[in-house]
């Protein structure tokens, strides 16, 4: 399939779970490298090929295409046990990994105490301010690991695994700090905390380092060399734009730069090198965890979307909150990443609804807002302004060309395009590769 620019990014424009994995897999046929640049094992990408479903959390989706090099870049926080498990599962399933996966030596490690910190912090917040104050973390240690990255003195990077004496000293320091802080959080929440044993952790990490050694590399240098050689690079975002630590619905966000803006720091790539930005958006809205979701439907519509769309988290299994498509949020995300095109996912889920609604604006205290509020407290209070359009009764999962879609389905897609101000290049009508319609 022809591309518009040599290098591209696939980024989610909602609260995650948009179907990025499917489109990365679809586009990878035309690319030589796939690079994951942010997030951690809290991002689950599902890809269906034939009758087989793959759930990837850290390994880029390009691993499902032969001959493609896959990079986990420096902006990712790496759970070493998770990625080793994924590698083993892929190879046991007949998909060789070997030289087709490289992991940045500058990536920070998610360690067991980060996951414990996640749970203890949520429990402490609930004990002090009530459960409504919780962020709704996945518990995968992502936030605590990024916090240590910024803290610096309590962080461990992949490269540190190959400096055993320096690592021993570092872990002794970390254990002292974490045993004090996590013990205090446990006390606040009435939980127990088993202190970190730095010697045992040191031995474990040295073993993990040897298992990871064949994959460790300077991924930024690999990307630069590939671009200089004329090879095409596809960047794969984790999480959705509305979970961006700077531009999302803060504080109900993840801890990394989830938009296309995160590529440059998260992969070591100059901004001028990207030309194609594919924004992924569901035909409706979903969100997992706490935080504002203005178009959420706590009713039969929400249930219809959840059950037809199998809206349960790839990583956690939690039921997703579902509602109508939010164009205010979509425009905000598309502009941030500079989306050059949109891919509309799960259009088939809307089949059977007589009418569809699109949120075109927010009203707050009787006035229309100009854009997307920075304050989560304001966003909780906004009233969505809806435009109603006809639905379609026909099932569309068997459709294989855009022009074969029901007229009302095409009209819905084209209305999204007009309201977003970004061309829709692809429409998905099911999870399998062949259920991708190119316009």
Image (tube, helix red, strand yellow):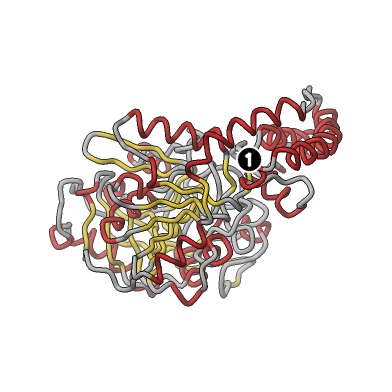
Residue neighbourhood size for the residue with mark 1, other residues' Cα within 10 Å, grouped as few (<14), some (14–19), many (≥20):
many
Quarter holding residue 142: top right
Which residue ends up furthest to the bottom in the rendered image?
Answer: 272
Q: Position of residue 270 (x, y in %)?
A: 52, 72
In front of the other: 226 or 14: 226
In front of the other: 209 or 313: 209
Can the viewer see residue 298?
A: no
- Taking the image as shown, residue 186 lies to the left or right of residue 308, namely right
Q: Position of residue 40 (x, y in %)?
A: 55, 45
Total numbered labels = 1
Q: Which residue is drawn at 77% across and 30% down?
A: 198
- Taking the image as shown, residue 428 lies to the left or right of residue 109, namely left
In front of the other: 396 or 68: 68
Residue 113 lies, with reference to residue 135, above or below; the image says above
Q: Residue at x 38, y 41 (%)?
A: 98
Q: Which residue is drawn at 63% across and 47% down?
A: 159
In front of the other: 223 or 41: 223
Regarding mark 1 in the picture, which secondary structure is present there? loop
Residue 165 lies, with reference to residue 369, above or below; the image says above
Q: Which residue is drawn at 67% across and 53% down?
A: 251
Q: Where is residue 286 in the image (x, y as percent from the top left)?
A: 46, 48
Image quarter where the C terminus lies is: bottom left
Image quarter where the N terminus lies is: bottom left
- The residue that label 1 is drawn on is 110
Can the viewer see residue 336?
A: yes
């Amino acid at each position: 399939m022809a591309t518009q620019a040599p290098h591209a990014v696939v980024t989610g424009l909602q609260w995650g779970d948009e179907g990025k994995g499917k489109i990365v897999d679809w586009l990878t046929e035309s690319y030589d490298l796939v690079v994951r640049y942010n997030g951690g094992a809290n991002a689950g990408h599902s890809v269906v090929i034939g009758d087989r479903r793959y759930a990837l959390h850290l390994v880029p989706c390009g691993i499902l295409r032969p001959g493609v090099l896959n990079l986990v870049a420096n902006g990712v926080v790496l759970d070493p046990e998770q990625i080793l498990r994924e590698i083993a599962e892929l190879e046991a399933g007949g998909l060789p990994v070997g030289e087709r996966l490289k992991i940045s030596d500058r990536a920070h490690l998610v360690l067991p105490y980060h996951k414990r910190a996640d749970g203890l912090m949520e429990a402490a917040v609930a004990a002090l301010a009530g459960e409504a104050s919780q962020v709704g973390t996945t518990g995968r240690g992502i936030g605590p690991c990024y916090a240590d990255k910024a803290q610096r003195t309590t962080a461990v990077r992949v490269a540190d695994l190959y400096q055993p004496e320096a690592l021993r000293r570092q872990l002794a320091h970390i254990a002292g700090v974490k045993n004090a802080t996590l013990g205090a959080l446990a006390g606040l929440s009435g939980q127990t905390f088993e202190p970190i044993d730095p010697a045992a952790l040191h031995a474990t990490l040295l073993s993990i380092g040897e298992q990871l050694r064949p994959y460790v590399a300077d991924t930024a240098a690999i990307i630069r060399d590939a671009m200089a050689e004329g090879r095409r690079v596809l960047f794969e975002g984790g999480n959705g734009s509305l979970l961006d630590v700077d531009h999302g619905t803060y504080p109900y966000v993840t801890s990394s730069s989830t938009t296309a803006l995160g590529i440059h720091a998260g992969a070591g790539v100059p901004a001028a090198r990207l030309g194609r930005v594919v924004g992924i958006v569901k035909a409706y809205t979903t969100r997992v965890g706490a935080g504002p979701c203005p178009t959420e439907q706590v009713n039969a519509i929400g249930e219809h979307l959840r059950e037809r769309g199998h809206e349960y988290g790839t990583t956690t299994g939690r039921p997703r909150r579902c509602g109508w498509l939010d164009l205010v949020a979509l425009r905000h995300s598309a502009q941030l990443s500079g989306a050059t095109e949109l891919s509309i996912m799960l259009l088939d889920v809307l089949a059977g609804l007589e009418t569809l609604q699109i949120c075109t604006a927010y009203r707050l205290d009787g006035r229309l807002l100009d854009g997307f509020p920075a304050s989560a407290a304001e966003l909780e209070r906004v009233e969505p302004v809806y435009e109603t359009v006809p639905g379609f009764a026909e099932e569309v999962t068997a459709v294989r060309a855009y022009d074969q879609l029901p007229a009302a389905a095409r009209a819905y897609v084209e209305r999204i395009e007009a309201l977003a101000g970004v061309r829709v290049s692809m429409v998905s009508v099911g999870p399998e590769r062949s259920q991708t319609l190119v316009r």
